Amino acid sequence: MPRTLFAIAGMLIAVPAFAAPVLEVETNNTFATANVLTAAEQAAFAGANAFVFDGVLTGGVVGGPPADVDWVSFTITSPGYLTAALYGIPNSLVGDTIMGLFDSSGTWITADDDSNIGLWPSFETILNAGTYYIVIGHFGDAATSGASQPGDWDGLNANGAPITASSLQYKLVVGFNAIPTPGAAALLGLGGLAMARRRR
Ligand SMILES: [Ca+2]
Ligand SMILES: [Ca+2]
Ligand SMILES: [Ca+2]
């Protein structure tokens, strides 16, 4: 084999496996027990600016334990636009899900009920660098028209009873577009800081 082909083959072998979805691991029912992307999954997210999270959201039954809630945590290292969309698999429109976003201190950022196809949620928001948490639950679990606390996502309805719902398989697709440096500086209010440094 010519040397260039050896070099190309070496490059192909060195390419990380970007395509593998992140698989949920129960129990991930609270902010504190969120599934955190592994270092390899986090590196793949940074390389592709996207990751997919596959999970199952089980329903509750009357008199039984609460319905399922799933938390996943990831980190972005620059400001940018984050888009998250939830889909049913395999190509399923079963169920009514909701989804929320919190920062690393558990402060609510946004939530959605039905902005994706059917009754599936999606949202897009601008974030600074940091660690964030996405939570997925059944409709009726927590408010999606206003702020909520992480503890509001507990698999219980407003009466404190388990949310009775069908179990479903889902695919969470998260995409990230970094804001180019000048925009990032403006977003972070660093323009003034840079000017102040220049004056010295
Ligand atoms: Ca689950
Ligand atoms: Ca769970
Ligand atoms: Ca919904």
Image: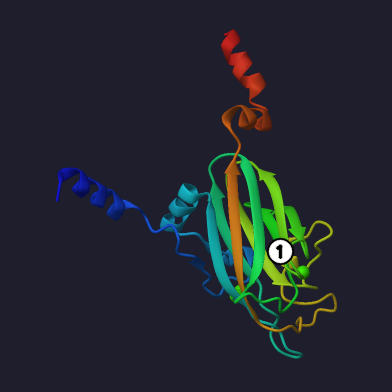
Q: Nearer the viewer, residue 183 or 12?
A: 12
Measured as percent of width and height from the top left, residue 184 is found at 62, 32
Residue 29 visible in the displayed image: yes
Q: Which residue is mark 1?
A: 99
Measured as percent of width and height from the top left, residue 3 is found at 16, 44
Colouring convention used in this rendered image of the protein: rainbow
Q: Residues within 10 Å of mark 1 (few under 14, many from 20)?
A: many
What residue do we see at 60% from left, 56% from top?
A: 174
Q: Identify the element where label 1 is drawn.
A: strand
Measured as percent of width and height from the top left, residue 185 is found at 62, 28
What residue do we see at 59% from left, 48% from top?
A: 176
Task: Say whether residue 169 is left or right of residue 140.
Answer: left
User: Which quadrant is home to the C terminus?
Assistant: top right
Ligand 3 near label 1 (Cβ, under 8 Å)?
Answer: no
129 to 92, vertically: above or below: above
172 to 190, vertically: above or below: below
Amino acid under disc 1: Met
What residue do we see at 15% from left, 46% from top?
A: 2
What residue do we see at 78% from left, 67% from top?
A: 142
Res. 29 image quadrant: bottom right
Task: Say whether residue 87 is left or right of residue 4.
Answer: right
2 to 156, vertically: above or below: above
Quadrant hosting ligand 1 = bottom right
